[in-house]
Amino acid sequence: MSVLQIDDDGFRLDGEPFRLLSGGLHYFRVHPAQWADRLHKARLMGLNTVETYVPWNLHQPRPDRFRMDGGLDLPAFLDLAAAEGLHVLLRPGPYICAEWEGGGLPSWLLAEPGIRLRTRDPRYLSAVDDYFTRLLTPLLPYLSTRGGPVLAVQVENEYGAYGDDAAYLEHLAGSLRRCGVDVPLFTCDQAADLERGGLPGVLATANFGSRSTQNLAALRTHRPTGPLLSTEFWIGWFDRWGGHHVVREPDRAAQELDDALAAGASVNLYMFHGGTNFGFTNGANDKHTYRPTVTSYDYDAPLDEAGDPTEKFTAFRDVIAKYAEVPAEPVPPRTGKLSLAAVTLPESAGLLTSAPLLGDATGSPHPLTMEQLRQDFGFVLYETVLPAAGPALLELEQVRDRAQVFLDGQPVGVLERENHEHALAFTVPRADCVLSLLVENQGRVNYGPGIHDRKGLLGKVTLNGTDLVGWTSRPLPLESLDALDFATTTSVPTGPAFHRGTFELTGTADTFLHLDGWTKGNAWINGFALGRYWSRGPQRSLYVPAPVLRQGSNEIVVLELHASHRARTVDFRDTHDLGPTEE
């Protein structure tokens, strides 16, 4: 049993001075068959601890349903960490930010009108208490006080940047304790928010990625005694669609790490290995303009998205070796990757015509939100019949987040939240024309007051100034594509369509899917959702983990929302393309 103590002069583990050398590794962003490899490489870099968030929205997709299996088997991840000789910092939220969909808060909370998230709203606190009970009860054997690897547990996450209700934080800390958490608790905030986000008697830690000496001094001013810990020592950053791929020069990042360790601080590298926002799980930011995050969470980390060591791995290992013993094993080499050119996707199924196979429609006077439809991710197809022919001005009060507009199945335009677009003019060719709006949830906002981010069509929908009524709202979560009826066709379908092909493999390895000539959509390999692609960039390829491939026949399905490659081909290459960096 290893027990972490918080003393005036620092951490102690089993009575001996101890420095946390930790790295972020989110189990839910890594294929579970690759957890052991990533954990092993964390130890080889010299880390003694790994940190992970816990995504409430995946573990509890509905109030009455809780999952801890497959890629969400947190006990299995903790077992592997312990087997590798690593301690764990556990960050269960309930809010995690993490550039993750909704900051980890489940979408069903937003089905409650007027609910106030991250407050003492009784509806929110009741849900949080239930979540903690479901999550932590099976995790109690993994606490270090009971022989497990979890040394400490975080209370909330960067709360000082959101609010200043100490009673709210006290409730969360009390809930953790009532659930049996008897290891040290800690909070984390940026230096300017330490006062608002802290709790008496709970370790306060700071988040930063530069000016290490200055930020540690601010933390020391706030807490004159006790350990110095940077819970998020930022060594890279995330990317957004339409931006550039963010990188940070290895030597500069290593010098900041050296400065922090020379000051006697403990650190958690954010991230050691970022992984991937598989499926529809990316978050978004909204600081007056909505900006969705890309599929890759490479984060320019010491271990890249495919788990290969980067220059930072070696640079950080050299710094860590100045302050702690580093394993004598050599830096692991880059693993071999698979290449396969020009895989054809000859079968297609139109999305609009296939919609009844993918979700049941609900009739109502006005469009229903995703939350009202009990839907987390994906798309909603809204349809109504227009009363008359002629010129038309369609106005949508709130588009969350991207609406493709069709008349009798023919595309007439796109309205994007990101571009603050609300109106579209077109001509209705005849009376009783069907107006269809395919609305994509591009990721719920994960930071700031925008976390109350309901999806679909919100507010009024008018045509020539008159309310449009009599709608059907059809959820298309795309959790399974098994119901689709594909047909071989030589022509490229008009409008959104699924395209399917197969390819043969004699062996498996990691690879990268390149969709040159395609526009925007999602991709699946053998039913595994790889994530979103978009020609807007910067990301121009999708990571394919080796475990989702198999020897023999493999299936690929691509949902293209606009226009596919004329030949409907894709490539699997041995190199990633995360896009251009800032000059």
Image (cartoon, helix red, strand yellow):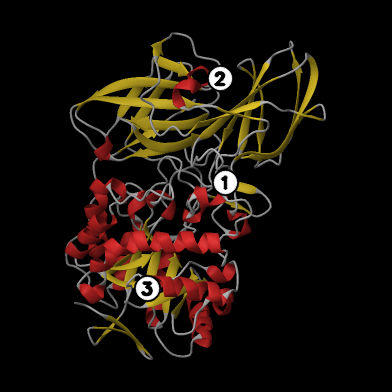
> Contact (CB < 8 A) between labels 1 and 2?
no
Q: CA distance from mark 2 to mark 3?
A: 54 Å
Residue 93 visible in the snapshot: no
**Amino acid identity at mark 3:** Arg
- Percent across and percent down for residue 196 are 58, 76
Q: CA distance from mark 1 to mark 2?
A: 26 Å
Q: Secondary structure at mark 2?
A: loop
Q: Nearer the viewer, residue 251 or 338?
A: 338
Q: Nearer the viewer, residue 476 or 501?
A: 476
- Percent across and percent down for residue 340 are 30, 27
> Contact (CB < 8 A) between labels 3 and 1?
no
Q: Quadrant of the N terminus?
A: bottom left
Q: Earlier in the sequence, mark 3 or mark 1?
A: 3
Q: CA distance from mark 3 to mark 1?
A: 44 Å
Where is mark 3, residue-wise?
178
**Amino acid identity at mark 2:** Gly
In the visual, does 460 lie left or right of 119? right
Res 299 → quadrant: bottom left
Q: Secondary structure at mark 3?
A: helix
- Disc number for residue 495: 2
Within-10-Å neighbours for mark 2: few <14, some 14–19, many 20+? some
Within-10-Å neighbours for mark 1: few <14, some 14–19, many 20+? some
> In the image, what residue occupies the spot 62% across and 59% down?
449
Residue 376 visible in the snapshot: yes
> In the image, what residue occupies the spot 51% across and 17% down?
353
- Disc number for residue 243: 1
Q: Nearer the viewer, residue 378 or 182?
A: 182
